Amino acid sequence: MANFGELVLVLGDLHIPHRASAIPEKFKRMLVPNKMQHVIATGNLGSKENFDGLRDLAPHVHVVAGDMEFAGPQSAAFPETTVCTVGEFRIGVIHGHQITPWGDHMALGAMRRRLGCDILISGHTHKNEVVEQEGFYHINPGSITGSFSATNPGATPSFVLLAVQGSKVVCYVYELVNGEVDVSKTEFTKTSAEDGGVLLR
C-alpha cells in the first residue's frame, strides 16, 4: 500500500440508525483498519459508536459537525470547519448545510477561499461529486449508507478514497450500484506556488 502514498478515506452522512441501518456490507469489507492514514468525515454520523468505529480505522480522524449530529460530549467537540494537511495539499472540510444554495459551487468556492485550502470537502447533499472550480477541487463523498435527504430521497451509497503523493492526488469514488461496487477515478496535481497553487487535472 506504500506505493499509493497517504490514503485518506472520505465519507459522511451515515445517519445510522435514524435513516439507515448500517454501512453496506460490500463497503464495510473495504474499510480495513490501519490501511489508511486519515479519515475525513463530513458529519451526521448518527451515534458515538459510529464515531468510535471511524477512530478504529486510521490514526488521524477529522470530523466536522453535521446539522443532525448525535448528542454527547464527542459531537459537541466537532468543529464547524477544519483544515488538515496531507502531502502538499491543504484540505478544508465542512458539512455543507452552511452553503446556500446547498451544493452551489460558487458558494463552495467562497468557503474554500475563506479556509485557504486547495481541496474543499463537503457533504449534506447525499450526492457524490468531484468538481474542478476555479482551478481547485470540490469533493463531496455523498452518503456512505445511501440515506435519504430532503433533496435526494434515492441517494446512491458512496464514499471517496484519496491517494496523496506529494503534489499529486488520485481520487477514487466508490458507488454501490445495483448491488455492485463501481469505481471512478480522477487525478490532479498541485502546481507551483508562483502559478497560484491551482490544481490541474
Image (tube, helix red, strand yellow):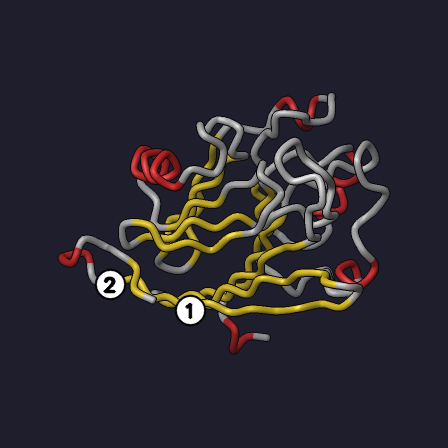
Answer yes or no: is residue 51 visible.
no
**Image height check: is 22 above or below 124?**
below
Tell me the SS state at disc 1: strand
- Compared across the picture, whether 85 is left or right of 12 comes to left
Q: Residue at x 48, y 50 (%)?
A: 139
Answer yes or no: is residue 5 visible.
yes
Mark 1 surroundings within 10 Å by alpha-carbon count, few (fewer than 14), some (14 through 19), many (20 or more): some
Q: In x, y percent, where is residue 70? A: 73, 26
Q: In x, y percent, where is residue 40? A: 57, 47
In whole angstroms, how far apart are the C-alphas of marks 2 and 1?
Answer: 13 Å
Name the amino acid type tagged 2: Thr
On residue 61, the disc is: none
Q: Nearer the viewer, residue 48 or 12?
A: 12
| Residue at the extreme left of the image, as rendered | 194
Q: Nearer the viewer, residue 162 or 178?
A: 178
Q: Which residue is the site of mark 2?
A: 191
Name the amino acid type tagged 1: Glu
Q: Residue at x 19, y 56 (%)?
A: 193
Tell me the SS state at disc 2: loop
Q: Quadrant of residue 1?
A: bottom right
Q: Nearer the viewer, residue 161 or 125?
A: 125
- Compared across the picture, whether 30 is left or right of 76 comes to right
Q: Residue at x 76, y 40 (%)?
A: 50
| Residue at the extreme bottom of the image, as rendered | 3
Q: Which residue is the site of mark 1?
A: 187
- Compared across the picture, whether 23 is left or right of 113 comes to right
Q: Residue at x 75, y 33 (%)?
A: 46
Q: In x, y percent, where is residue 8? A: 55, 58
Mark 2 surroundings within 10 Å by alpha-carbon count, few (fewer than 14), some (14 through 19), many (20 or more): some
